[in-house]
Image (cartoon, helix red, strand yellow):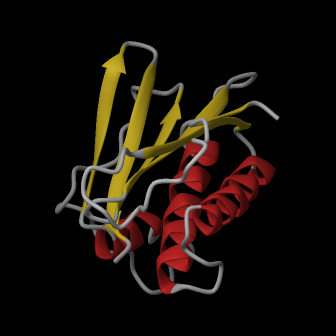
Amino acid sequence: MNADIAPARASRPDPTQPGTPARHFTIRLSATPRGARLARRLTAGQLHTWGRPYDSEANRTAALLVSELATNAAVHGRVRGRDFRLRLTLHPGDATLRIELTDPRPESRPPAPGVLRRPSPDEESGRGLLLVEGLSTHWGTTCADPYTKTVWCEVDLA
């Protein structure tokens, strides 16, 4: 598997103690519905490994956020032959999880936070970013280079 996981230490630090280093998980996935499903499952598994059990509200919320952002990356950020990247960063000191989805379509940016329009009840799509905005503490979009964009959000897992 093409995942980069922060190396485990011989003695595991207590994630509830201040000063504990952030934990990272990064993987590239195909920009397809299957890749989006896999992103959700891998997120749930990684959070379980980091001490947030599968059946916890924190795990379910993070998996839902990843699902929405990964689906958007597969649908709106897809370029044939290019993957999207999922990156999770857990800051144990304040129990904040940063979720980043990077895709190869910098020109296809979502609306800015706070200005999302609510779809009419008969529309079948258009609610994903409303969920992201409602469930996360912050979210936004960055373009670090001319070839990609990253849609990110942060969620409090405490």
Q: Viewed as shown, does residue 126 lie left or right of 74?
A: left
Image coordinates for residue 99, horizontal then vertical, percent: 44, 51
3 shown above or below 72: above
Which residue is outermost to the front?
11
Image coordinates for residue 33, horizontal then vertical, percent: 75, 53
Which residue is outermost to the left?
114
Q: Viewed as shown, does residue 136 lie left or right of 148?
A: left
The quarter of the rendered structure image containing the N terminus is top right
Residue at x-position 67% and y-position 53%: 39
Residue at x-position 45% and y-position 23%: 148
Residue 52 occupies quadrant: bottom right
The quarter of the rendered structure image containing the C terminus is bottom left
Image coordinates for residue 50, horizontal then vertical, percent: 56, 62
Residue 141 occupies quadrant: top left
144 shown above or below 120: above
Between 67 and 61, the one lying in front of the other is 61
133 shown above or below 24: below
Task: Inspect this view and state whether residue 58 appears.
Answer: yes
Between 35 and 109, the one lying in front of the other is 35
- All told, the count of numbered labels is 0
Residue at x-position 41% and y-position 35%: 150
Image coordinates for residue 25, horizontal then vertical, percent: 57, 43
Task: Inspect this view and state whether residue 78 appears.
Answer: no
